Amino acid sequence: MNAPREVVPVATSVEERVASADWARVAQELDAQGCAVVEGLLTGAECGELAALYAREEPFRSRVVMARHGFGRGEYKYFAHPLPGLVAALRTGVYPRLVPIANRWSEAMGLDARFPEDHTRFIERCHAAGQVQPTPLLLQYGEGDYNCLHQDLYGEHVFPLQVAILLSEPGRDFTGGELVMTEQRPRMQSRPMVVPLRQGDAAVFAVRHRPVQGARGVYRVNMRHGVSRVRSGHRHTVGIIFHDAA
């Protein structure tokens, strides 16, 4: 008689999924590449719930049409306080998993900044410096839209890692529209990277710099990210940035 199969509990809440993610692997991939993917961080239903918010006005503090500013094509909206519950849970739940990496990177690059374990304390630091506007955002792209390579800085206090979660399904909802990154090492040409994502997957990546070990010690490399041209359909992404804006 066969032994009964072990039943593995399924993480049903976003908090449980954040807690069960392999953050040791994420740290290794961030150290090696400046980017890592957490698969299935959001469910399809949660992705649809967030994407549907874009048609509403009340959850947001501002709307940006990229073409007006030379940022690319497409648009995005910054969430207002209070953040939607799902966005707030992601911001406060993922932050402490990234703090050890952020502090280790800051020390390796010879920077003075150190980050508290609790996100609320870090936000208090931002607000004391005049960075009081929430930065999590919802992005919407249609056919022909793209996002130029950029960095999300917003002020003096910058948490060195951020998260982008794809809310649409490639091949079903849209084609094209890959998350792309470049890494610029001193006196070298830029290295391009394409980050493949499915609906609900989260990309964790460097906001501005990351440390790289060289022959003469650790040096900083400059990171930028963007989105390639959407060839068809519509693409939605939620961005979780951990520092607030001035």
Image: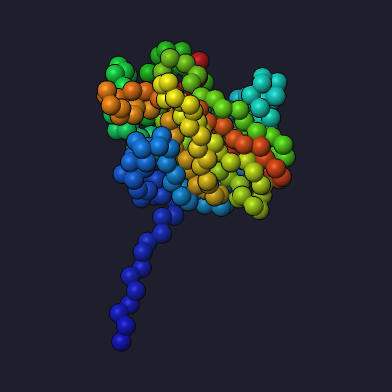
Give the image quarter of residue 209: top left
Residue at x 29% of width, y 24% of height: 218
* Residue 160, image x, y percentages: 40, 26
Colouring used for the render: rainbow
* Residue 173, image x, y percentages: 66, 49
* Residue 220, image x, y percentages: 37, 23
Between residues 133 and 222, which one lies in front from this camera angle? Answer: 222
Q: Residue furthest top?
A: 129
* Residue 234, image x, y percentages: 68, 43
Residue at x 60% of width, y 50% of height: 169
- From where the camera sits, is residue 106 visible? no
60 shown above or below 127: below
Give the image quarter of residue 18: top left
Horizontally, residue 104 falls left or right of residue 54, namely left
Between residues 199 and 171, which one lies in front from this camera angle? Answer: 171
197 shown above or below 222: below
Q: How many marks?
A: 0
- What quarter of the picture does the N terminus occupy? bottom left
Residue at x 57% of width, y 52% of height: 45
Q: Residue furthest bottom?
A: 1
Residue at x 48% of width, y 43% of height: 202
240 shown above or below 37: above
- From where the camera sits, is residue 7 visible? yes
